[in-house]
């Protein structure tokens, strides 16, 4: 294959792709890691929530169960309570134990309390 005068080799092009603004790839990775650490540290310093308590996790569990049952057209309070208790007996301890200690904000808890669909609860806890 003939090369035109002034064209660069594929190897030279590859090297130019691996640099952005004159920074080698290794430096970009370090820069990105530094930025992520800075953003992460700033968000923690800004008060990005607190470790979830058992009571908060219980409230999330109960609200999620109520909303899920409503989505299945189960609205009788007694039936909702019975089914919620059954799920709590089956898997509640495991789910709540996984929740306790995770970071949560007061805004997320308020969002869960106001949610009316399972998708909204999921968005509250993202």
Image (spheres, rainbow, N blue to C red):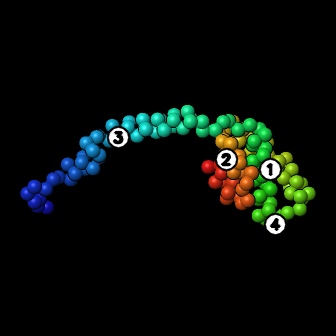
Q: Residue at x 15, y 53 (%)?
A: 8
In space, the residues marked 1 and 2 are separated at their CA atoms by: 15 Å
Question: Where, by quadrant of the figure, is residue 56 drawn?
Answer: top right
* Residue 11 point in image, percent of width and height: 21, 49
Looking at the rendered image, the disc whose residue lies closer to the viewer, 3 or 2, is 2
Q: Which mark is residue 73?
A: 4
Mark 4: secondary structure: loop
Q: Position of residue 41 (x, y in %)?
A: 51, 34
Quote the CA–CA distance across marks 3 and 2.
Answer: 34 Å
The residue carrying mark 2 is 108
Are there few (<14), some (14-19), or many (20+) residues within 10 Å of tag 2?
some
Q: Is residue 61 visible?
A: yes
Residue underneath mark 1: 62
| Residue 86 in sight here | no
**Distance CA(mark 4)–CA(mark 1):** 17 Å
Disc nearer the start of the sequence (4/1): 1
């Amino acid at each position: 294959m003939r090369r035109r005068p002034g064209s660069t080799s594929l190897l030279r092009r590859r090297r130019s792709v691996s640099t952005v603004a004159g920074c080698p790839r290794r430096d970009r990775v370090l820069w990105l890691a530094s930025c992520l650490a800075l953003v992460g540290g700033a968000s923690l310093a800004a008060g990005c929530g607190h470790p979830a308590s058992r009571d908060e996790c219980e409230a999330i569990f109960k609200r999620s169960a109520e909303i899920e049952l409503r989505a299945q057209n189960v609205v009788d309070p007694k039936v909702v309570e019975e089914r919620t208790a059954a799920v709590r007996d089956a898997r509640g301890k495991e789910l709540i134990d996984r929740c306790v200690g995770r970071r949560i904000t007061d805004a997320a808890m308020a969002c869960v309390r106001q949610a009316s669909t399972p998708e909204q609860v999921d968005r509250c806890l993202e």
